[in-house]
Image: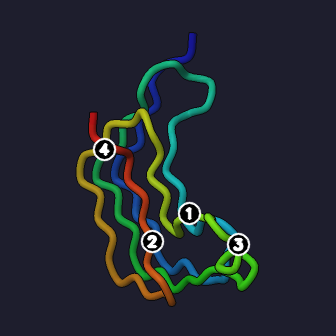
Amino acid sequence: MAKPTYLKKTYNTNIFGTFYANAVVMSKYHQSDDKSFFENITIDHIHASFCKGTIDVPGNRSPLINIGEDMEIKSLYISHFSEMKLTIRFPQSA
């Protein structure tokens, strides 16, 4: 059995580009049945957009910043985000 995943004090900056799906993804470790734990995570200076094909696909709900399911997050900061259309997906509250 895998141990829970912990990620603390991470600073991600200067993310530039045109993306088909996600520019930033936070998700749990795929082989663990336990939750993943994130603390004091900063995502800063993101200059991103979707490629034309992504925007034109009907029903496409892929966000540039994707926060996955089955995680415990304490202190997530997102700043200096510029794009042509802001979409951030957060998991539904139970």
Give the side of residue 54 with respect to residue 91, left or right. Answer: right
- Residue extending farthest left: 75
**Residue drawn at 28 percent across, 53 percent down:** 40
Dots 1 and 2: beta carbons under 8 Å?
A: yes
To which residue does mark 2 refer? Answer: 87
Q: Which amino acid does label 2 sit on?
A: Thr
Q: What residue type is labelled 4?
A: Ile
Q: Which of marks 4 and 3 is nearer the N terminus?
A: 3
Give the side of residue 7 with respect to residue 30, left or right. Answer: left
Q: Alpha carbon of mark 2 to alpha carbon of mark 3: how far? A: 15 Å
Q: Which of marks 2 and 3 is nearer the N terminus?
A: 3
Quadrant in which the N terminus appears: top right
To which residue does mark 3 refer? Answer: 57
Q: What residue type is labelled 3?
A: Val
Q: Earlier in the sequence, mark 2 or mark 4?
A: 4
Task: Tell me which corner region of the image, top left, top right, bottom left or bottom right, holds residue 29.
Answer: top right
Q: Alpha carbon of mark 1 to alpha carbon of mark 4: how far? A: 22 Å
To which residue does mark 1 refer? Answer: 61
To which residue does mark 4 refer? Answer: 73
Q: Alpha carbon of mark 1 to alpha carbon of mark 3: how far? A: 9 Å
